[in-house]
Image: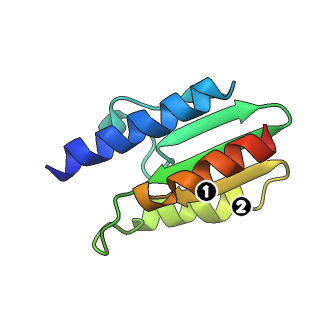
Amino acid sequence: MAKGKEADFTRQVRSLASDMGWLEMHPYRSDRSTPGYPDLTLARAPWVITAELKLDDKRSQLSAAQEVWKHELERCDKHAYYLWRPSNLDDIARILYEKG
């Protein structure tokens, strides 16, 4: 059931970003992607955003590989890395608006 909830949240964020003019990419098969790479990549010049999407659940934490990507991406200019949860939807909309 958690996977369905995460998929619903992912669709919400992708739709919001698309409606605001962001290009978005979400790999459909994470098991065939580079381990730890964030769930969502958004681009709207001059910004690139990568976001790891997790449920509002204390057990839903970043893996070691996700922590490595987070650390490296946070060092990049004109790039923002976020860990987003459903409880952050208002903040997500604000961030996409402000950076867009």
Q: Return the residue found at the far front.
A: 90
The one nearer the camera, 63 or 52, is: 52
In the depicted structure, whether residue 86 falls above or below residue 32: below
Q: Is residue 85 left or right of residue 95?
A: left
Residue 67 vs residue 2, the one in the foreground: 2
Three-letter amino acid code at disc 2? Glu
Q: Position of residue 6 (x, y in %)?
A: 31, 47
| Nearer the camera: disc 1 or disc 2 | 1
Measuring from the top left, give residue 65's x and y in whole percent.
45, 61
Residue 85 visible in the current orientation: yes
The image shows residue 58 at horizontal and vertical percentages of 31, 75
Residue visible at 55% across and 34% down? 16
Task: From the viewer's side, name the closer residue of 40 and 10.
Answer: 10
Q: Nearer the viewer, residue 69 or 28?
A: 28
Which residue is pictured at 40% across the width and 40% down the height?
A: 10
Q: Which mark is residue 15?
A: none
The residue tagged 2 is 74
**Residue at 67% in and 60% down:** 72
Q: Position of residue 22 (x, y in %)?
A: 67, 28
Task: Tell me what residue is drawn at x 67 percent, y 29 percent.
Answer: 20
Horizontal side of 62 relative to 20 (left or right) equals left
Residue 33 visible from this viewpoint: no
* Residue 47 as seen in the image, left or right of residue 15: right
| Label 1: how many Cα within 10 Å (few below 14, some 14–19, many 20+) | few
Determine the image quadrant of residue 12.
top left
- Density class for disc 2 (Cα within 10 Å; few <14, some 14-19, many ≥20) is some
Of the residues shown, which amino acid type is indicated by label 1? Asp
Left or right of residue 82, residue 48 in this image = right
Q: Which mark sits nearer the N-terminus, 1 or 2?
A: 2
- SS category of the residue bearing label 2: helix
Element at label 1: helix
Q: Which residue is mark 1?
A: 91
